[in-house]
Structure formats: structure tokens, C-alpha cells
Image (cartoon, rainbow, N blue to C red):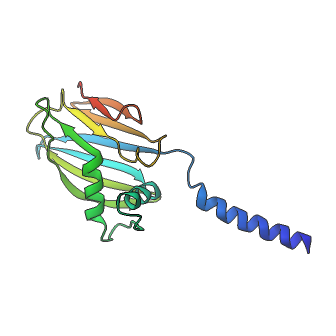
């Protein structure tokens, strides 16, 4: 009888711990690539889906979100990403971009953005504080690929904005 109770407790505890401890780190990866043919910057942001769902919930009066590739949450994702990811010109103007959409891949959500490449990004400021309001250990890595070169930037609680020197 004690063994059955012990096994039941272990099963219950392991199920609860898997709900609480989803992953040990909070990070995102962003890639920015120039498409010279289309004259656009193609931007992809990879976030853990559960982290993004949590941030969307906090941003929307604790509404529950279940993100899937063909759900009806794009307006919420677009609003959130535009609030936390953006470019500011040397003249201090926020640069417009277009939210293309999102898709699921395993435990991650890819967010796709496109921005006109009518001027170089050099000396622009990039804000990327995505998920930092939700997790104080959040790290956002940005890789910019231009003319066969790669520049990387790390965003966190202490550095939410970087000046792009490319």
C-alpha cells in the first residue's frame, strides 16, 4: 500500500513539475537579412511558444492563448511584436515594417517581418525587449547578415536597445 501511495505521489509530482519547469533558459534568436532583389529586410524572430503565450496573456488582461500556425491570434502577436521590436532612425523616427505572419516549429514560434530597405541600417537604433517584461533573465540574440558579413547583438534586461554600427 505504501508503494502505491509513493508511486502515485511521484507520478503526480512529476506531472506538476513538468508544468512548472518548461525550460531552464529564456532566449530568442532573430535573423535580419537583406533581400537586394526585393529591396527589403527579411526578419525572422524565433521565440519559445510557451513564453510568447505567457507574454501575450500578461499583455491582454490574462486572456489565455494557444498559439498554432493557423489560429486567429495574429493581431495579438503583431501588436505585441510591434511594441517590443523596432528600428529608430538617426533622426529619431520609428521605421515602419510589415508583420507577415507566424508559424509553429516544435516548441518555437517563428514571427516573420518585412521592412523596406530604402536606407542602410547603419546608425539606426534597434529595440528588442521582447519577453523581457515577462522574464528578467530573457536574452534576445540578433544576427544581421549584410554583404557576406554577420554582426551579432545581445539584448537583455540591461541592454534593450543597441545602436547598429554595421
Q: Quadrant of residue 20?
A: bottom right
Determine the residue located farthest toward the top in the rendered image. Answer: 165
Residue 38, percent across and down?
11, 47
Residue 32, percent across and down?
26, 40
Nearer the observer, 59 or 163: 59
Q: Residue at x 34, y 35 (%)?
A: 160
Give the position of the N terminus as an image quadrant.
bottom right
Q: Which residue is drawn at 25% across and 64% down?
A: 75
Determine the residue located farthest toward the bottom in the rendered image. Answer: 1
Q: Does 68 sit left or right of 26 as displayed?
A: left
Determine the residue located farthest toward the left in the rendered image. Answer: 118
Count of all numbered marks drawn on residues in the image: 0
Determine the residue located farthest toward the front in the rendered image. Answer: 61
Q: Which residue is drawn at 22% across and 46% down?
A: 42
Q: Quadrant of residue 80?
A: bottom left
Nearer the observer, 160 or 120: 160
Nearer the observer, 119 or 78: 78
Q: Does 127 sit left or right of 47 as displayed?
A: left
Q: Residue at x 18, y 36 (%)?
A: 88
Residue 147, percent across and down?
21, 30
Nearer the observer, 97 or 65: 65
Give the position of the C terminus as an image quadrant.
top left
Looking at the picture, does residue 29 appear above or below residue 50?
above
Q: Does 38 sit left or right of 2 as displayed?
A: left
Amino acid at each position: 500500500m505504501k508503494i502505491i501511495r509513493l508511486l502515485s505521489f511521484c507520478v503526480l509530482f512529476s506531472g506538476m513539475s513538468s508544468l512548472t519547469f518548461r525550460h531552464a533558459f529564456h532566449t530568442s534568436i532573430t535573423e535580419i537579412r537583406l533581400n537586394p532583389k526585393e529591396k527589403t529586410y527579411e526578419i525572422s524572430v524565433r521565440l519559445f511558444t510557451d513564453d510568447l503565450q505567457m507574454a501575450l496573456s500578461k499583455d491582454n488582461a490574462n486572456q489565455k492563448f494557444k498559439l498554432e500556425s493557423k489560429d486567429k491570434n495574429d493581431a495579438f502577436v503583431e501588436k505585441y511584436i510591434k511594441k517590443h521590436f523596432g528600428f529608430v532612425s538617426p533622426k529619431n523616427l520609428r521605421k515602419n515594417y510589415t508583420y507577415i505572419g507566424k508559424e509553429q516549429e516544435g516548441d518555437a514560434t517563428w514571427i516573420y517581418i518585412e521592412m523596406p530597405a530604402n536606407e542602410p541600417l547603419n546608425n539606426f537604433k534597434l529595440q528588442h525587449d521582447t519577453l523581457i517584461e515577462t522574464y528578467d533573465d530573457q536574452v534576445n540574440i540578433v544576427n544581421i547578415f549584410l554583404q557576406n558579413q554577420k554582426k551579432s547583438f545581445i539584448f537583455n534586461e540591461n541592454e534593450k536597445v543597441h545602436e547598429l554600427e554595421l
